[in-house]
Structure formats: structure tokens, C-alpha cells
Image (cartoon, grey):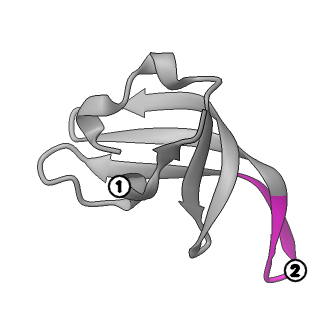
Amino acid sequence: MKTTEVNASLVGRKCLGMAFGELVKGTITNVEETEYSKTVYFILDTPINWGGDIYTKSSNWARKADEFGSLHHLVLTD
């Protein structure tokens, strides 16, 4: 996904995003935009155990100027 495709209408949609080095399924809960970047927050369908800690949410982001970041891994699934 590109930063130009990110907007508030994505909230509630199912997605496949990058978290802890693997693609995971989740549901988008929030979209945040700053002057320089956009971030999509999502709740994981299946919690991830990473180093003994359990994670239930994650986010993907990208800079607006050059699209650098993990947002390019995010795909809508529904």
C-alpha cells in the first residue's frame, strides 16, 4: 500500500501486514498522519509470542516523501 491510499475509511478493514518479520492477519483500528509520514495501526488476529512477550497489535508506516517504511507490505484482504 502507498501513503496516498491511506485514509480514515480503512478503519475496520481486514489486512495482511508486516509484524516481527512475518506477514500477519489483522484488523485496522486507526490511521495516523503527520506532516512527514502515515501510519496504519492494526490488531492481530492471532497474538505473537516474541521473546517471551505476547503482542496483540502492531503498525506499518511509511514516509510520504519516498515511501520508505513497512507500509508497502500492508495489503487489504476483504
Q: Residue at x 46, y 18 (%)?
A: 8
The amino acid pointed to by label 2 is: Gly
Q: Is residue 64 left or right of residue 38?
A: left
Residue at 35% over, 55% down: 72
- Kindly identify the residue that appears in the image at 62 percent across and 72 percent down: 20
19 horizontally vs 65: left or right: right
Q: Which residue is most to the front?
A: 78
Magenta residues span 47-57
- Which of 66 and 46 lies nearest the eye of the viewer? 46
Secondary element at image label 1: helix
Badge 1 or badge 2: first in the primary sequence: 2
Farthest residue to the bottom: give it. Answer: 51
The kind of residue tagged 1 is His
Q: Main secondary structure of the magenta part?
A: strand
Residue at disc 2, secondary structure:
loop
Say which residue label 2 marks.
52
Tell us which disc is closer to us: 1 or 2: 1
Question: Any magenta on residue 19?
Answer: no
How much space separates mark 1 and mark 2, taking CA atoms?
Answer: 28 Å
- Where 69 falls versus 5 (above or below)? below
The one nearer the camera, 50 or 22, is 22
Can residue 34 be seen by looking at this rendering? Answer: no
In the rendered image, residue 56 lying in the magenta stretch gets the answer yes
Q: Could you say which quadrant of the image residue 4 lies in?
A: top left
The residue to which callout 1 is attached is 72
Where residue 23 appears, as percent x and y from the top left, is 60, 65
Q: Position of residue 51 (x, y in %)?
A: 79, 83
Classify the position of the N terminus by image quarter. Answer: top left
The correct choice, above or below, for 70 with respect to 63 in the image is below
